[in-house]
Amino acid sequence: MWAPGEEVAKLTFYGLYALQHRGQEAAGISVADGRQIVVFKDLGLVSQVFDEQVLSSLHGHLAVGHCRYSTTGSCTWENAQPTFRNTPTGSGLSLGHNGNLVNTAELMVRAKELGVDTGQGQGATTDSDLVCGLLAAAAADTGIEQAAMELLPTLRGAFCLVFADESTLYAARDPHGVHPLVLGRLERGWVVASETAALDIVGASFVREVEPGELLAIDADGLRSSRFAIPEPKGCVFEYVYLARPDTAIAGRSVHATRVEIGRRLALESPVEADLVIPVPESGTPAAIGYAQGSGIPYGSGLVKNAYVGRTFIQPSQTIRQLGIRLKLNPLRDVIRGKRLVVVDDSIVRGNTQRALVRMLREAGAVEVHVRIASPPVRWPCFYGIDFASRAELIANGLDTDGVRRSVGADSLAYVSMESLVAASEQPKTRLCTACFTGEYPIPLPEDALIGKHLIEELNAAGRAMDPGSVGASSASVPAGYGAEEAIRRP
């Protein structure tokens, strides 16, 4: 956010609140006043990290905020963002990153050649900090803006970056535009955010999306745009399915309207005789409304969600995920008892949520439980910033639809087709990344030894020199031997 005369720290805090669903492990805000940059960050939710006293101490005219969902590097204070680096000239640089890079090992080689610290001591061990370090090192010779124009074309993977020195705010989006990044206008400034919902919360008007392959710079002279790569749009279709808020718009399409249309199409594709359609709240609610509209079966609320329990999908450990499912939802027995239910959820990843839900609904008196899923089967891990774990943990990878049905205990199970999902998004399939459903990765992946959440930490611990010729990208497919390793994750 760049807004002279505004309380940028507090506005950024509210913006992060609107984006809390994208990451719950850590939160941070950096502020700059033209002379210095101050960063405040910690592990925890936005409301746990910041209070009135902290926010009142953060003065400046520009700010960078971040909610962390770890995909590279452990869940430590050092890896919380915004990350910060000093340039050789003594100025500072703070950076926040949404996405995940797939050529991190290659960037480490370059960093070592330039003498950039890669977290070998107690420093950060994320791809985000690596980018910040490379930018800061190059800025001594060319300035940050030119350094970014030279570095950004060499990054591979998904990245929405917001970074700042003492006086200028920058924003960049990868050439594929995998995840959303939008530009908004305040009366006295500008805002860049991951979703349009965050613009609404801070009172900014939507201007446009940051284009794939675009770098923005905002300072006292206004806003300027540069192209660092040719756009090759491959937007993440799972943003429409689950990750984005329903009150967000992506590529001009309402996420809520998309999910309702997915549900309507799902009802036409996979009808069933039932008494009531209920959602798995909240992410399954729009699709359940659409299913009810398409099927003519009444819609109802059969599950009550505890609003104070985080999203089970993005918790970092399996134990917490399983506990979270039981804490998160409770059945309305009077509504469910004696009914044939259609239960609509956004996706099945590991199957834990659906298995627990079916059991709870039967215990609450449901006569039949028919599960309908508002996305195709997730069979492939995501390397661009969403936690699907490994292929070995994806329930649909090892089982066909009937096998998954038996595993979760449902009377029937059906997924929406890929064709209907794409049609509901109103985007051409050629402009979408569907890798988690199809295994077709639009951005080439490296060898399996050069990818993983703890790659930087492992290479630092090994203390081995990397051969730059050994870290190039291979074909766009899942790395050979990819099995029990945890997949890359981020909001």
Image (cartoon, rainbow, N blue to C red):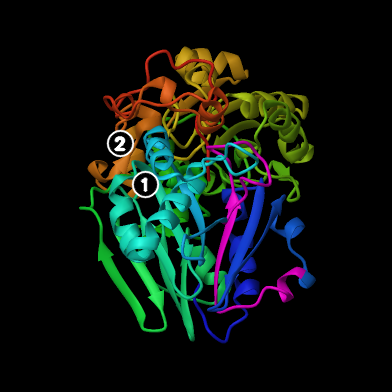
The residue indicated by pointer 1 is 178
For residue 183, above or below residue 326? below
Residue contact between numbered discs 2 and 1, judged by CB atoms under 8 Å? yes
Q: Nearer the viewer, residue 218 or 297?
A: 218
**SS state under label 2:** loop
Query: Which residue does the image show at 28% across and 54% down from the upper left?
Result: 150
Magenta highlight on residue 152: no
Q: Nearer the viewer, residue 120 or 105?
A: 120
Residue 374 lies left or right of residue 31; in this view the side is: left
Q: Position of residue 210 (x, y in %)?
A: 35, 62
Residue 280 lies left or right of residue 305; in this view the side is: left
Q: Nearer the viewer, residue 401 or 457?
A: 457
Residue 303 lies left or right of residue 155; in this view the side is: right
Give, as a three-letter code, the residue at label 1: Val
The answer to whether residue 273 is seen in the rendering is: no
The residue indicated by pointer 2 is 443
Please, what is the dominant secondary structure of the magenta stretch? Answer: loop
**SS state under label 1:** loop
Q: Give the quadrant of residue 284.
A: top right
Region rendered in magenta: 54-82
